[in-house]
Amino acid sequence: MRFMSNQSGISHGWLLLLVVLLGVGVTLAVWLSRSDTSSSVTDESTSPPFPIPPYSESRYLNVGPEAQYIGSAACAVCHPNNHKSYLRTPHSRALSDLDPNAEPPDGSFDHAASGRSYRVYRKDGQLHHEEVLRTTEGKEIARVDQPVRYLVGSGHFTRSYLIEVEGFLHESPITWYTSKQKWDMSPGYDTPQHISFERPAPLECLSCHMGRAEEVNGTLHHLKFQEKAIGCENCHGPGSLHQNLHHTRKLAPGEADLTIVHPAKLSRTLQESICASCHLSNPAIVAVRGREPHEFRPGRPLSDYRVHYQFVDGNDRMTVVGHVEQLRQSACYQKSTSLTCVTCHDLHRGEDLKDKPAFYREKCLSCHTSQPCKLELGERLKKEKDNCVACHMPRGDTEIPHISFTHHLIGRHDAKPITSLKPLAELMASDDITHLEPLDQQRNLGLAYLKASRNPSYRAYASPFRSRAIELLEGVSKAGLRDPETVLGLSELYWSIDPVRATFFAKQVLAQQSSPNTRSLALMILSNCDFQARNYPTTIESLEELIRLRRIAEDWRLLGSCYLMQNEFQKALPAFQQALAIRPFRSTIHSGLAAVYRHQGDSKKADEYQEKAQWLNQHHQD
């Protein structure tokens, strides 16, 4: 879940639920038809060691694990002017505790696609977001009412929100759109059957909207924040070595301070890696083996941590996605050795620009000294107040409603943009990855095709993408490289076509040390396959760990179903009730509660929940 900055991506929590839906198609017949498969996969149970890809060399001392983060407040002690200018940037307001008095006014709206109504109101010093679904006669079917815990975004474009329930963070389906001065659905929620307040907000998704946080007890979206705002160390790297140096001695004349990264002194590639760590969105992003995406440290290339993949069309031309990639496709960028993000974006500018067109025109004219524009001055002044950016980097709509951003492809924009992929489009790494071994390159490409196959924008290509992913990852596995992410990818790919093989790979993941995200997905696949095979005790065992790692309605619904199938109604009831509290708009949860109450002899409650289940089924069909 990248909220605003990663517009081309899909939130991580939404992908988790997409994967859940894939598992619904697993049937007992398929399971039984593959009963002989287990003997064909047991030879893959051991894996020879493969060294983790090494980091690139860096002259900076704070890129290593010995450097610790100290927080922006510590930096401000010695750098008050830089800190003051930083406070004027949107980065300083990326994530914050909610102040109800500073939020937009109360309001309400209806969402036609889902049939739900929304209300924003204040109560007992808290801002509440409410979601209600009613019949046409006004009978209430489901309601969620949550106090808001955190504000995401500076408010320049939007104000999105996080709720916190039992320590777990979820995104609210309600967002304030500054340009329209109105409440409306959050990005990704404008669909008939969106996921309400259930979308998780894990570390991987929030890492570009905050300074630093850590996962609590290995959970997926239960986080402890060390610094909420995007701070000094996000761009300069951890500051402990720098602080210690200047507290103990003075630098000798001419001595370079390598204890802290100075972005202006970096090469263009390393400069852009800092910006691209959040402002580069692609069809697929894959973490390098042994790395987590949020571990990036300034002073090293981004490709040390993750690889970004783009589509190449039939003319061997890259499609353009994201601000950084758009800039790289520009002729101005390609013909320059110095043009980069910080050419125009100064994060320490002391004051607001009084004449933005003149400021950016000066940037352009630093290179375009001869024939800077084909339009005569009179025409330029008449058209866009002599504004280079207005013509050559126009603002345009995005897939996020009510939001437009400046296009970073510098050039003429009268040609039609690439809007769709050609058949059999190929994925290709955006950056140089020759530092990775061929087997790691194959692994990353296989995982990239798997990630692209999940994206609804490429639904027409999902099947060939998944076939390509299986081919690549099977080759990696047979060569002996079976890290948790590779094995998890194979487990997911086989989930709906070969549950025995999917189970085998899921167990391989759980036998290794892995991230909360990887482990939770493996547990989810394993529990679904075991449930379809009627192995209820082992399903319960997986689910009991899974509900500790994350807060997802389907996990609790499946747990309730296991207890129901074993006639343990006293255990089934609280499991279904927890599922309902998380997502009361699912008919299957209401059906489960109806079954429990009927077995317990409470026909009134059974009929009530069954009636709601039937109404929800019909409502979703309509």
Image (cartoon, helix red, strand yellow):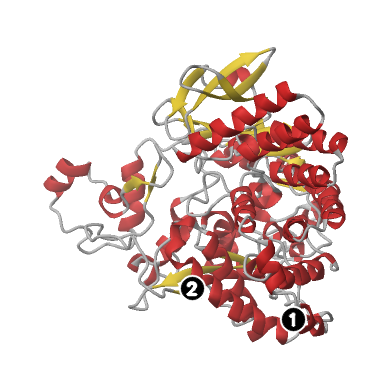
- Reading the chain from its start, which is encountered first: label 1 or label 2? 2
Looking at the image, can residue 148 be seen? no
Q: Is residue 456 left or right of residue 132?
A: left
SS category of the residue bearing label 2: helix
| Front residue (pair 146, 434) | 146
Q: Quadrant of residue 358?
A: top left
* Amino acid marked by disc 1: Leu
Q: Residue at x 47, y 69 (%)?
A: 310
* Amino acid marked by disc 2: Pro
Between marks 1 and 2 in the image, the one whose residue lies nearer the viewer: 2
User: Label for residue 464?
Assistant: 2
Q: Residue at x 54, y 31 (%)?
A: 615
Q: Is residue 406 left or right of residue 191?
A: left
SS category of the residue bearing label 1: loop
User: Which residue is tagged 1?
Assistant: 481
Relative to 121, residue 87 above or below: below
Residue 72 coordinates in the image, percent (x, y):
71, 42
Circle 2 residues within 10 Å: few <14, some 14–19, many ≥20: some
| Front residue (pair 152, 579) | 579
Q: Residue furthest top?
A: 124
Circle 1 residues within 10 Å: few <14, some 14–19, many ≥20: many
